[in-house]
Amino acid sequence: MLVASVEESETVFALTRRLTLRPGWPEDAPALSEAIGHEPVVRNLARAPWPYTLGDAEHFLLLPRTPHQPRFQIMTRGENRLIGGIELIALGAGVHELGYWLTPTTWGQGFATEAGRAVIDIARHALGGERLVARYMIDNPASGRVLRRLGFAETSRGRLFSVARNAEVECVELALDLAEPCAPPMPIAA
């Protein structure tokens, strides 16, 4: 089930079987810094520094949000624990980049795929996008498996600068045509 609440800021929430995707709030900073603050997580992100501090989390949560670039905290339903983040970055001309991460204790449980499907449905139905792109670092094949399960196909290979590694890293670039459904559509309520 997907629930979208459109207000002045056009905030969107999504509910899946096990997850709540919602915007991050300043009071999430301690949970965010704890969840993301693992070198195996941050080293596979392009823009996150290592070590990742409480100040980094506070800064990230205060970044402006725009209606066409949804950025979500991935929360477990029930215990409401912050376990990751997922976002769409508008690149222009109907193209968005999908990015995500999960805290290590949740790896291998299908949470990235579940959150990814919800965000792809948001992109397909609420943003009017035509194409999603994504990248993963070559030494992170698990992320590639998630993206392929979501329907992404490899388009090329390249290099990506990682702030945490302070180096360029080989990456695989993928794309998903949003005209092709990857899962049954989910209703959106506004």
Image (tube, grey):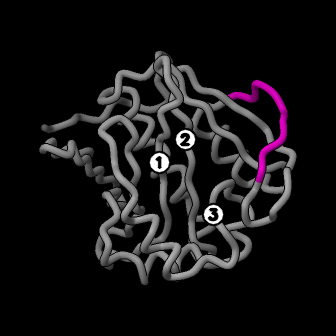
Q: First in sequence: mark 3 or mark 1?
A: 3
Q: First in sequence: mark 2 or mark 1?
A: 1
Task: Say if mark 3 contacts mark 1, CB within 8 Å.
Answer: no
46 to 125, vertically: above or below: below
Q: Dot 3, how many residues are within 10 Å of its Cα: few (below 14), some (14-19), or many (20+)?
A: many
* Residue pictured at 40% horizontal, 62% vertical: 73
What residue would you read off at disc 3? 48
Q: Amino acid at mark 2?
A: Leu
Q: Amino acid at mark 3?
A: Ala
Coordinates of residue 173 in the picture (x, y in percent)? 74, 34
Coordinates of residue 22 in the picture (x, y in percent)? 31, 58
Q: Based on the displayed image, in which of its 4 quarters is residue 74 positioned?
A: bottom left
Bounds of the magenta segment: 153-161
* Residue 18 as seen in the image, left or right of residue 84: left
What residue would you read off at disc 1? 87
Q: Dot 2, how many residues are within 10 Å of its Cα: few (below 14), some (14-19), or many (20+)?
A: many
Q: Single out the mark in the foreground, 3 or 1.
A: 3
* Residue 55 as seen in the image, left or right of residue 23: right
Q: Alpha carbon of mark 2 to alpha carbon of mark 1: how far? A: 6 Å
